[in-house]
Amino acid sequence: MHRLPSKHSIRRLRLAAILLSSGYLLCPVAACLLAQFFITDDRRMAETGIGLIVLTFVLVILQWCVATRANCPLCLTPVLATKGCAKHRQARSFLGSHRLRVALDILFRNSFRCPYCDESTTLRVRPRKRR
């Protein structure tokens, strides 16, 4: 099991995981509110739904900025950013998304398995070598 080089990398991974999972959560909520608006013609529902869509776009941009520097300690690939790299043949997904699986593992298990190199990493700082 691999460990991360610093506390900053752990914070980046957690922040990117929170932003990614909240984006996946807000999108269906906004769609339901807009559908409710079309059914009931309630203006407040429409305003809330459009506000949530704008918030989702802001979260996606923030997540993209943070996730580009949240790397796997072994292969140095950003595990929560969209990359065109080939996934490992045994990499698992959740609801069709490898990034969502990694984000949920980071939030709930305090470790993750890289979808590119399939190595397990715990969210702890590795000990420094003494000279």
Image (cartoon, rainbow, N blue to C red):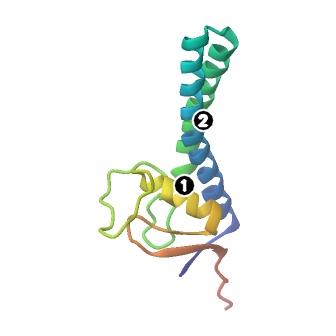
Q: Is 66 placed above or below 86 here?
A: above
Q: Residue at x 56, y 19 (%)?
A: 34
Q: In the image, residue 98 lies at what x, y percent?
A: 43, 56
Q: In the image, residue 83 lies at what x, y percent?
A: 38, 51
Task: Tell me if 11 is positioned left or right of 71 in this view.
Answer: right
Q: Is mark 2 on a helix, strand or loop?
A: helix
What residue is disc 2 on?
A: 26
**What type is the residue that disc 1 sits on?**
Arg
State the mark number for residue 12.
Answer: none
What residue is disc 1 on?
A: 69
Disc 1 crowd rating (10 Å Cα; few below 14, some 14-19, many 20+) is some
Marks 1 & 2, CB-CB < 8 Å contact: no
Q: Residue at x 66, y 74 (%)?
A: 124
Q: In the image, residue 95 lies at what x, y percent?
A: 43, 51
Residue 89 found in image quarter: bottom left
Residue 26 found in image quarter: top right
**What type is the residue that disc 2 sits on?**
Leu
Q: Is 123 placed above or below 26 here?
A: below
Any part of residue 9 in sight: no
Quarter of the picture holding the C terminus: bottom right
